[in-house]
Amino acid sequence: MLLDTDVWSVLFARSTRTPDARTETWRNLLVGCGLVIATQTKAEVLAGLAINDLGAKRRESILSQLAGTSRVPVTEDVIVAYADLTADCKRAGHALYAKQHTGDRWVAATAIAVGVPLLAGDGIYAGAPGLEILTDSAH
């Protein structure tokens, strides 16, 4: 299973002082599943750390979690899946085609390329061509 950045962040980087109601559901969905993230997710997490001053201890904790999470590299298969998904979304009029969702397309393309479902907390992926998606309401 590939985790979208929002899910990874809630499960592995969110402050315990600000709990997310979806955490338990997501953790239950992950039981017995191997999990990976896209290269895009690693980049987004690192950008968040560069932008936000979270303190040295929390930053190191997040970096440690990130280092311990398997990542799918950008391969030729991922690149082709991205190009195909972009074209398919444009043809279908799917919102994932919009420029502001370029990063989300990379995440979705990574899941498509490696043939695993995507666990995401936002609705932008719903109905994306060729993408198997799990949401916080999937049981």
Image: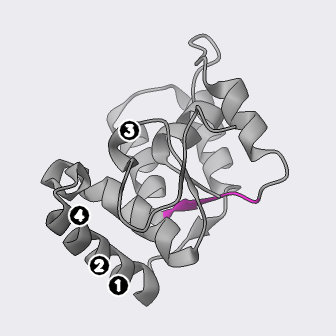
Which class describes the residues within 10 Å of circle 2: few (<14), some (14-19), or many (20+)? some
Q: Residue at image x 64%, y 34%?
A: 11
- Residue type at the position of mark 1: Val
Residue placed most toward the observer, 83 or 65 = 83
- Kindly report the distance in space between the C-alpha atoms of the residues bearing marks 1 and 3: 24 Å
Image marks 1 and 2: residues in contact by CB distance under 8 Å = yes
- State which region is magenta: 34-38
**What label sits on residue 123 in the rendered view?**
3
Q: Residue at image x 47%, y 64%?
A: 39
- Give the x, y percent position of residue 46: 43, 48
Figure colour scheme = one colour
**What label sits on residue 84 in the rendered view?**
2
Give the labeled residue for mark 4. 89
Q: Earlier in the sequence, mark 4 or mark 2?
A: 2
Q: Residue at image x 72%, y 25%?
A: 24
Q: Earlier in the sequence, mark 2 or mark 3?
A: 2
- Kindly report the distance in space between the C-alpha atoms of the residues bearing marks 1 and 2: 6 Å
